[in-house]
């Protein structure tokens, strides 16, 4: 622990503030995306919400999808793009292909049930990504159908923490 000393005046008490070193201060990042129609494609009716929690070492994806092909296995991946406005900017799978050229970690899949719904539970490590997983915020997420075609897209974003609500007269 680093110690910082703040002296307001020689006649006043000295205050010490303790904080963790930079290497210990990194906290988890959380983002979510709502997926909908893939840009430039006919709307396949796939919808869902996904949440991603990441630390410097690991990325965890969870969520639910509906409107999928019935009883089929397809893919779900974070992509390198930052927008679902145009198919040309959604990007490919997000990983450091320069330092890990033959190690795309996005072989991640879902299997839908008889109603075309699926739950996601995916874990990818920083070593597999070649990136700090906390930098996933702002990237696109893509749902692929069983043939590999892209059927839904969303952008990982964060929501500000709401301010606490106080009753009239509360401090």
Image (tube, rainbow, N blue to C red):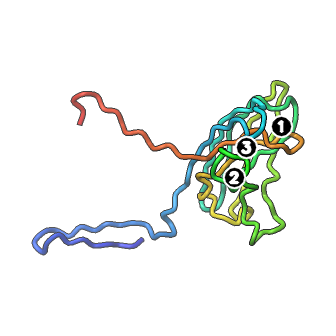
Residue that protrudes farthest toward the left in the picture: 11
User: What residue is at 74 percent from the left and 62 percent from the top?
Assistant: 128
The residue to which callout 3 is attached is: 121
Spatial separation of the CA atoms under disc 1 and disc 2: 27 Å
Residue 70, how many percent across, how many down?
Answer: 86, 29
The residue to which callout 2 is attached is: 89
- The first of marks 1 and 3 along the sequence is 1
User: What residue is at 71 percent from the left and 36 percent from the top?
Assistant: 37
The answer to whether the residue labelled 1 contacts the one labelled 2, judged by CB atoms less than 8 Å apart, is no
Spatial separation of the CA atoms under disc 3 and disc 2: 26 Å
Q: Nearer the viewer, residue 150 or 89?
A: 89
Residue 109, how many percent across, how many down?
Answer: 81, 45
Judge the density around disc 3: few (<14), some (14-19), many (≥20) Cα neighbours within 10 Å. Answer: some
Q: Quadrant of the C terminus?
A: top left
User: What residue is at 60 percent from the left and 62 percent from the top?
Assistant: 56
The residue to which callout 1 is attached is: 111
Q: Disc 2 on helix, strand or loop?
A: helix
Residue 9, how many percent across, how many down?
Answer: 13, 72
- On screen, residue 38 above or below 97: above
Judge the density around disc 1: few (<14), some (14-19), many (≥20) Cα neighbours within 10 Å. Answer: some
Spatial separation of the CA atoms under disc 1 and disc 3: 11 Å
């Amino acid at each position: 622990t680093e110690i910082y000393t703040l002296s307001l005046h020689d006649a006043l008490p000295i205050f010490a503030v303790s904080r963790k070193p930079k290497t210990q201060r990194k906290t988890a990042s959380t983002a979510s995306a709502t997926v909908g129609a893939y840009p430039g494609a006919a709307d396949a009716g796939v919808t869902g919400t996904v949440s991603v929690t990441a630390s410097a070492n690991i990325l965890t994806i969870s969520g639910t999808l509906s409107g999928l092909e019935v009883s089929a296995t397809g893919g779900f991946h974070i992509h390198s793009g930052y927008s679902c406005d145009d198919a040309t900017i959604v990007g490919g799978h997000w990983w450091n292909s320069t330092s890990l050229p033959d190690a795309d970690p996005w072989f991640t899949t879902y299997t839908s049930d008889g109603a075309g719904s699926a739950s996601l539970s995916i874990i990818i490590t920083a070593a597999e990504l070649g990136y700090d997983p906390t930098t996933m915020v702002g990237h696109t997420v893509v749902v692929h159908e069983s043939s590999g075609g892209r059927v839904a897209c969303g952008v990982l974003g964060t929501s500000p923490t709401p301010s606490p609500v106080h009753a009239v007269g509360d401090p």
